[in-house]
Amino acid sequence: MPSTEELKDTATQVRRDILRMIHAVNSGHPGGSLGSADFITALYFEIMKHQPQPFNMDGTNEDLFFLSNGHLSALLYSVLARCGYFPVSELATFRKLNTRLQGHPTTHDGLPGIRIASGSLGQGLSVAIGAALAKKLNNDDRIVYTLHGDGELQEGQIWEAMMYAAANKVDNLIATVDYNGKQIDGPVDKVLSLGNLKAKWEAFGWDVLECNGNDMQELVSCLKIAKQHTKKHKPVVILMKTEMGQGVDFMMGTHKWHGSAPNDEQLAKALAQLEETLGDY
Amino acid sequence: MIKKYTNSGSNDTRSGFGEGLLEAGRRNPNVVALCADLIGSLKMDAFVNEFPERFFQTGIAEANMIGISAGLTIGGKIPFAGTFANFATGRVYDQIRQSVAYSEKNVKICASHAGLTLGEDGATHQILEDIGLMKMLPGMCVINPCDFNQTKAATIAIAEYEGPVYLRFGRPKVPNFTPADQKFEIGKALHLNEGSDVSIFATGHLVWHAIEAGEILAEKGISAEIINIHTIKPIDKKAILDSVNKTKCVVTAEEHQMNGGLGDSIAQLLSLQLPTPMEMVAVNDSFGESGTPEQLMEKYGLTTNAIVEAALKVFNRKH
């Protein structure tokens, strides 16, 4: 198992990948990707039991992850490549014609590690519930994880799925929320407030945990606790307080970097804050 | 002489689905079913009773049902997701598009109460656009069987087919005339009558009306070739072109909008490969309304006589 320091180093390299990928095509979503980089890194390098090769769509006896907020594609691709699902060099094809690394994740082009298309928001929790139910039918005791943006929770389908998972005791499921309080048009509280989010999940019958999603030690510890909360007749959700743009000072504290690419100068300034730990692609 | 077909006893196509689902479930333990609070209407009770652990009641939450269905395929399940055609398509189009069609998931979308013959509930429930919506999705197979026996056979067949399917059926009891022991071949048009003067391509409930129309046309000295297009996508191009090469004129008949329906698919094929005079029996850019199924089919022109008149018109056009 990697140490906290090793996980932090990996997350730093992942942040470099994200910025370089998005800069290269002048498109993508750096803000949320940087904010959730610690979580996805911890999940794939420490928490989940999974098999990069050969990739198995059914994921039998593997933990599964579904990225419901598909615009964090650069983050997911970087982590998948860094843990061996496909060559790291392929990150250079992100969002380019004929790539397997489409703007938003898809199974359509056979990229290992992707089990469902996402991008149109609000669908991933339902899909994860289906995969969790299949695991129960198959007597497969592994766990299904998801990530959702907090803005994404404005989609009605999420609440249908929340109701279903609790009512049907889908307890092999850990949903997580990238709770950064920001979305494209501004602060979530201004665009459409989620109100008391913790109370809402609790009222819907979920076991709610909270943590700082940008503190690697706390994050890993919370994810391990969350695992212990599974198989207890309730679905589990973690509200992860994060900072959009985490790791790059001028991208933090604003929603402006939700979907904007850095220019040459901004990239250089950003990379200077992120040490190359594993070697750039 | 026209080939005779006998109604072995009217029954609803949704009951054919219910029986087919039970049989598919017995044949393959990976077959699972979901429903959004319409078990009785879709005749899914027998499956629910025999396989309670393989059935998922989602409540009135169709978007979630489609997403759960997509997820169940990850793990090898073959989900049959059932609700009314209106809620199975238009209401959840984006969920089907992204999580099922684009993701190439082996989900069977099972849609009852399609079209005008839903009757008294009116236009809110009478979807006439569903075939169009579904056939536009890349990779989606679209099937609209004509009677109880064929719906049962189609339901069993789609369980053995790998890929997303839209299976459309209806509410009313209609003549049951296809063989009980038929093997359903996806994408294979069925010749019901050989003819030489006009090709009538029909789907769903309109197939029986096409047979009746063929008998009336025979009395008038016109030999109609009658073909049941139960699979609208992928459409049986060869069967259509072979028939039209012989008859040189076409009538299509369906319980759907003219825009986006069977006639639209055949018009596209023929205009590209074999331009041919054509008439369409379909709903002409209109919503439905309340009434009995018979009254509605009459008012919106989806009848045996409408097919006869269209055939006479197009037969005259080719000369």
Image (cartoon, rainbow, N blue to C red):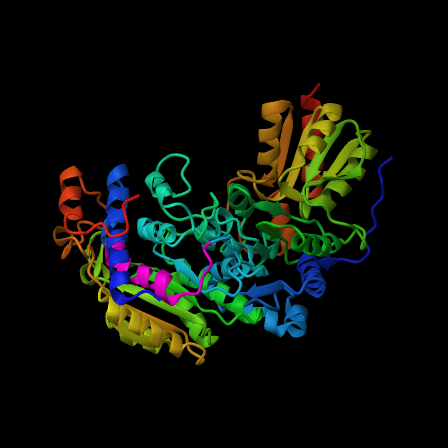
Quadrant that contains the N terminus of chain B: top right
Judge by depth and name the residue closer to the eye, B292 or B144: B144
Residue B296 falls left or right of residue A82: right
**Magenta-colored stretch includes residue A210:** no
Q: Is residue A150 visible?
A: no
Judge by depth and name the residue closer to the eye, B297 or B115: B115
Judge by depth and name the residue closer to the eye, B290 or A135: A135
Residue at 19% across, 57% down: A246
Residue B48 falls left or right of residue B243: left
Quadrant that contains the C terminus of chain B: top right
**Magenta-colored stretch includes residue A38:** yes
Give above or below for B209 relative to B313.
below
Q: Is residue A192 visible?
A: yes
- Locate residue B305, reporting x and y percent: 70, 40
Q: Which residues are magenta?
A: A32-52
Give above or below for B219 relative to B52.
above
Q: Please identify the quarter of the rendering in which residue A164 is found.
A: bottom left
- Locate residue B256, reporting x and y percent: 58, 44
Q: Residue furthest top?
A: B319
Q: Please identify the quarter of the rendering in which residue B14 is found.
A: bottom right
- Locate residue B161, reporting x and y percent: 65, 50
Q: Residue furthest bottom?
A: A232
Judge by depth and name the residue closer to the eye, A46 or A167: A46
Majority secondary structure of the magenta segment? helix
